Image (cartoon, rainbow, N blue to C red):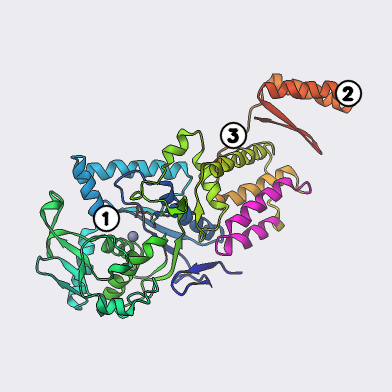
């Protein structure tokens, strides 16, 4: 069975077949480094990470590029507010982002690209678009993409807005806008006072790139003119990804991306979690409540990436309890690593290759833990195999060293239990509990875990 993925272009689940069978090339729109990302943003990166892990699990080689938007309207605005240079300001938040993705056990991409390192490449694309008359210079020296010249404009975001396109005579300078404002968008923004120190002197004049061209340049410079998969959150579909297609395909004449994939939103009180709505939480808020970032990962995995999830603290606390249970159960499996159970593995692979059905994959993990027919060592091997995709960091868990006093009490209890002296056995169990450990009877004996 091939991997099957939902392609926003065409809006259906398709069999995945890479352009070049030796390597899958993926580009993920990364963070704008102007503050701490909120946990909604991290859904986009956990989703991209899960996708990558599934492809690796299926035997593909993957080249994955993620960018850091370190120049755009927001980074310039907020660095000025803080009286810092753009570089100092964005480097700080880039480092915080790296720490966060490590704590979420997100595999680093093959490369992080910074937009400011690719200005020359952006200028080259814009020059091609000017030559082909797909772009034009405005009175102030900015360059805009003429969306009417690109006949497929609107295909990704399903702009049934033919009329709107017809009426789209104007231009839009801001990086972010909605469908109500379908207009020619800025590829290059001529310098104005608000930009302060931030500008490049190029063949296009003094100015800075628009946000959308950044991703086209970084993607094509690192992955070639045609990519297999491009990911982002659904709010990137319009205008960002629509504009990426227009610029890239306008410049090369080739299809830019074969599979466009997007994660749905994390909501709060049924509204999109967003910085602008002030209804967001960061990973720091989670950690300050004593909850592991991996519990957030687990919580997201229990929903399909294409469904909206409403964030409430109770749900995350539930995920934390589930994660602890999982970790304890895993540690209780002992130190031997046996053979991967092939039946479970096949089921797991079918689930995750079916458009990343992680809810079913997580449920299967619990079924396996409960399955008495699979011996502990094989369970351990199979769970470690599953965790290559789930990324819950189980392989890093140290086996619990049980203090000698607890082992002795547990042994005494086992003797009492075998002699059917249940009173003593219960007393010893309670004593073990008060010392912070719990004992679980199993077919083959018992296991001890920290509570
Ligand atoms: P930004 O830094 O605003 O460009 O957003 C980074 C990523 O997070 C993009 O892929 C967005 O689509 C995604 N994103 C933003 N808000 C949410 C949300 N509430 N839920 C899920 N993804 C989001
Ligand atoms: Zn992007």
Mark 2 surroundings within 10 Å by alpha-carbon count, few (fewer than 14), some (14 through 19), many (20 or more):
few
The x and y percentages for residue 145 are 22, 71
Give the residue at mark 3.
Answer: 398
**Distance CA(mark 1)–CA(mark 2):** 71 Å
Looking at the rendered image, the quarter that the C terminus falls into is: top right
Which quadrant contains ligand 1? bottom left
Q: Of marks 3 and 2, which one's residue comes earlier in the chain?
A: 3
Q: Is residue 353 above or below residue 332?
A: below
Magenta part of the protein: which range? Answer: 344-373
Give the residue at mark 2.
Answer: 421
The x and y percentages for residue 100 are 41, 42
Residue 338 seen in the current view: no
Residue 331 seen in the current view: yes
Was residue 367 drawn as part of the magenta stretch in this picture?
A: yes
Q: Nearer the viewer, mark 3 or mark 2?
A: 2
* Left or right, residue 329 beside residue 177: right
Give the residue at mark 1.
Answer: 115
Q: Of marks 3 and 1, which one's residue comes earlier in the chain?
A: 1
């Amino acid at each position: 069975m091939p991997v099957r993925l939902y392609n926003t272009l065409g809006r259906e689940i398709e069999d995945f077949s890479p352009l070049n069978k030796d390597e899958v090339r993926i580009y993920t729109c990364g963070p704008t480094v102007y503050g701490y990302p909120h946990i909604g943003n991290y859904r986009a990166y956990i989703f991209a990470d899960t996708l990558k892990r599934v492809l690796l699990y299926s035997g593909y080689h993957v080249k994955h590029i993620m960018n850091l938007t370190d120049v755009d309207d927001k980074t310039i605005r907020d660095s000025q507010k803080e009286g810092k240079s753009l570089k100092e300001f964005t480097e700080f938040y880039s480092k915080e982002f790296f720490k966060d993705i490590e704590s979420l056990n997100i595999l680093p991409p093959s490369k992080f690209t910074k937009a400011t390192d690719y200005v020359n490449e952006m200028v080259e694309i814009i020059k091609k678009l000017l030559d082909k008359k797909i772009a034009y210079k405005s009175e102030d020296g900015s360059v805009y993409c003429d969306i009417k010249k690109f006949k497929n404009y609107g295909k990704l975001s399903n702009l049934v807005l033919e009329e709107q396109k017809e009426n789209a005579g104007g231009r839009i300078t801001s990086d972010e806008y909605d469908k109500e404002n379908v207009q020619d968008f800025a590829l290059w923004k001529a310098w104005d006072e608000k930009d302060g120190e931030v500008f490049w002197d190029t063949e296009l004049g003094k100015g800075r790139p628009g946000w959308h061209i950044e991703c086209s340049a970084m993607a094509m410079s690192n992955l070639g003119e045609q990519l297999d998969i491009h990911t982002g959150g659904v709010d990137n579909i319009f205008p960002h990804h629509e504009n990426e297609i227009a610029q890239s395909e306008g410049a090369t004449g080739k299809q830019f991306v074969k599979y466009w994939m997007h994660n749905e939103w994390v909501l709060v009180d049924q509204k999109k979690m967003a910085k602008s709505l002030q209804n967001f939480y960061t990973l720091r808020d989670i950690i300050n409540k004593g909850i592991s970032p991996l519990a957030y990962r687990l919580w997201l995995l229990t929903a399909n990436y294409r469904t909206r999830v409403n964030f409430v603290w109770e749900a995350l606390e539930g995920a934390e309890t589930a994660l602890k249970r999982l970790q304890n159960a895993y540690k209780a499996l002992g130190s031997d690593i046996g053979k991967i159970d092939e039946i479970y593995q096949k089921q797991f692979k079918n689930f995750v290759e079916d458009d990343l059905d992680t809810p079913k994959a997580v449920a299967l993990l619990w079924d396996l833990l409960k399955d008495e027919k699979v011996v502990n060592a094989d369970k351990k091997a199979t769970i470690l195999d599953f965790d290559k995709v789930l990324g819950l960091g189980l392989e890093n868990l140290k086996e619990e060293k049980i203090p000698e006093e607890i082992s002795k009490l547990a042994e005494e209890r086992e003797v009492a239990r075998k002699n059917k002296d249940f009173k003593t056995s219960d007393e010893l169990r309670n004593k073990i509990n008060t010392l912070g450990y719990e004992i679980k009877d199993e077919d083959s004996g018992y296991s001890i875990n920290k509570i």
